[in-house]
Image: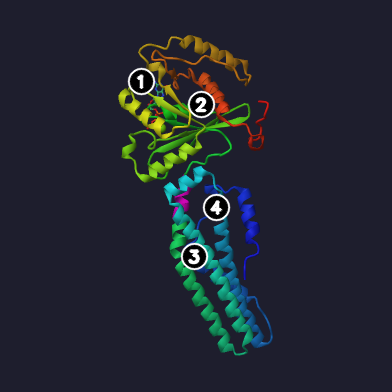
């Protein structure tokens, strides 16, 4: 017996775009059997027939069928609810690989599918035995045998259920990034001001998350410009120290970021207030440029308010940004970028200077980098824009 609804469920599943956070808890093998046998017993209790043989036959068949249906539905729902790797965005696939391993992910889901088929076969075979005999003893024996075999199948997928339960906990903590909106990856040595930057530029609340393999909090922020959302993602513990010190998992996560970024901002703290020397920060920049060759990397000097020499055009930028904000119009405007004495584009997240101009520059670069495909444009983004 097959599950005719599987095909439809899969289609609906793809349309729904499963979010990691929405995946229901995965039952353990014990919980799953309790649930199935509990329901089966209740279903059998409801059966009535005056003829004893008919009644027992119906009851036992109902027990087996109900247990099999509950288990099959649960297992196949789980298989369908978990995103299919073939259809997931590259970022998700790389993150799954980095966090839990794609091979294992596929293996454990396919174990559930296997179990659903086995259980369905056992139910068919044993209800047939019950239907074909008139001996009550043999009927009970067939029911016991069915339960024994079903329990043994569920026992065999115990480790898979456990693995999926644990992986769900891990994957839940990943940042949820919208693949259709531009994403700006913010990197740089520790303490250079990545989180402060994202926070200052974010219009809504920042989402705080973890990459499951670092203990650091990552920030996911966004701003909207002309109805298009721009996401900004933090990279603490990933792109902040020499590459040779990395393990495989971190490398995979980095490659995920590589696939994600419309633009990479490398923040540099020229004041060295962050605790990393300029020389080391430059080495890191070299490594990142090599690693992310092909992606536009923009270098931004942070904490301009701490610079020994104030950027020459500080007052000019302040004035231009204020005028622009006061006009209240969200129009693409060329604002002068704040430039420091080393020639870097600079900002002060603390005093909010140079931020609006940089935002405009980000919008411009992302727009230039985005291939115009009207079929793929996000809602609210028009070709003429
Ligand atoms: N004066 C001044 N301080 C800043 C500015 N931006 C950030 N800071 C300070 O620099 C320190 C580090 O800032 P964070 O935003 O936490 O830096 P980070 O790069 O996110 O650090 P990690 O997440 O640990 O890698 C904090 O004490 C901030 O208050 C700025 O524009 N001006
Ligand atoms: Mg931070």
Q: Which of 292 and 156 is in front in this view?
A: 292
Near mark 2 (Cα within 10 A), the count class, few <14, some 14-19 or many ≥20, is: many
Q: How far apart are marks 1 and 3 (CA)?
A: 57 Å
Task: Decide if residue 121 is in sight here.
Answer: yes
Q: Position of residue 77 (x, y in %)?
A: 58, 59
Sequence-wise first label, 3 or 2: 3
| Image-quadrant location for residue 163 | bottom left
Residue 168 part of the magenta-drawn span:
yes
**Quarter containing the N terminus:** bottom right
Give the number of marks: 4
Q: Position of 166 compared to 242: left or right?
A: right
| Image-quadrant location for residue 346 | top left
Near mark 3 (Cα within 10 A), the count class, few <14, some 14-19 or many ≥20, is: few
Q: Position of residue 266 (x, y in %)?
A: 42, 27
Q: Where is residue 19 in the image (x, y as percent from the top left)?
A: 55, 47
Camera-side mark, 3 or 2: 2
Mark drawn on residue 72: none
Tell me the residue at 35%/25% (across/down): 282
Read off the residue under disc 2: 201
Camera-side mark, 4 or 1: 4
Camera-side mark, 1 or 3: 1
Q: How far apart are marks 2 and 4 (CA)?
A: 34 Å
| Secondary structure found at label 1 | loop
| Secondary structure found at label 3 | helix
Tell me: residue 164, above or below residue 273: below
Mark drawn on residue 31: 3
Mark drawn on residue 84: 4
Sequence-wise first label, 3 or 4: 3
Near mark 4 (Cα within 10 A), the count class, few <14, some 14-19 or many ≥20, is: some
| Image-quadrant location for residue 143 | bottom right
Characterize the magenta stretch by its predominant secondary structure. Answer: helix
């Amino acid at each position: 017996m097959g599950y005719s609804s599987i095909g439809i469920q899969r289609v609906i599943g793809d349309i729904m775009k499963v979010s990691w956070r929405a995946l229901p808890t995965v039952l353990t093998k014990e919980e799953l059997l309790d649930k199935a046998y509990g329901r089966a017993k209740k279903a059998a209790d409801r059966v009535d027939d005056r003829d004893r043989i008919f009644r027992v036959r119906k009851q036992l068949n109902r027990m087996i069928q109900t247990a099999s249906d509950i288990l099959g539905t649960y297992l196949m729902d789980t298989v369908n609810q978990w995103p299919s790797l073939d259809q997931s965005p590259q970022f998700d696939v790389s993150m799954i690989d980095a966090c839990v391993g794609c091979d294992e992910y596929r293996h454990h889901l396919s174990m559930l599918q296997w179990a659903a088929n086995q259980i369905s076969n056992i139910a068919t075979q044993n209800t047939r035995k019950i239907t074909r005999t008139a001996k009550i003893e043999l009927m009970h024996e067939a029911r016991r045998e069915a339960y024994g075999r079903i329990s043994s199948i569920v026992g065999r997928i115990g480790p898979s259920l456990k693995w999926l339960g644990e992986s769900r906990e891990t994957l839940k903590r990943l940042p949820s990034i919208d693949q259709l909106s531009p994403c700006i990856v913010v990197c740089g040595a520790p303490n250079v001001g990545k989180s402060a930057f994202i926070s200052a530029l974010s219009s809504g609340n920042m989402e705080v998350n973890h990459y499951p393999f670092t203990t650091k909090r990552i920030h996911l922020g966004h701003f909207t410009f002309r109805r298009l959302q721009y996401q900004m993602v933090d990279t603490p513990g990933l792109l902040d120290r020499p590459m040779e010190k990395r393990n495989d998992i971190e490398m995979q996560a980095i490659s995920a970021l590589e696939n994600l970024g419309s633009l990479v901002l490398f923040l540099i703290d020229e004041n060295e207030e962050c605790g990393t020397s300029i020389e080391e920060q430059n080495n890191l920049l070299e490594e990142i440029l090599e690693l992310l060759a092909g992606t536009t990397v923009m270098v931004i000097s942070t904490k301009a308010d701490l610079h020994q020499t104030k950027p020459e055009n500080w007052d000019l930028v302040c004035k231009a940004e204020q005028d622009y904000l006061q006009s209240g119009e969200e129009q693409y405007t060329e604002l002068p970028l704040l430039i420091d004495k080393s020639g870097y584009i600079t900002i002060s997240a603390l005093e909010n200077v140079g931020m609006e101009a940089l935002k405009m520059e980000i919008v411009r670069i992302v727009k230039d980098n985005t291939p115009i495909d009207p079929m793929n444009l996000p809602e609210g983004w028009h070709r003429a824009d």
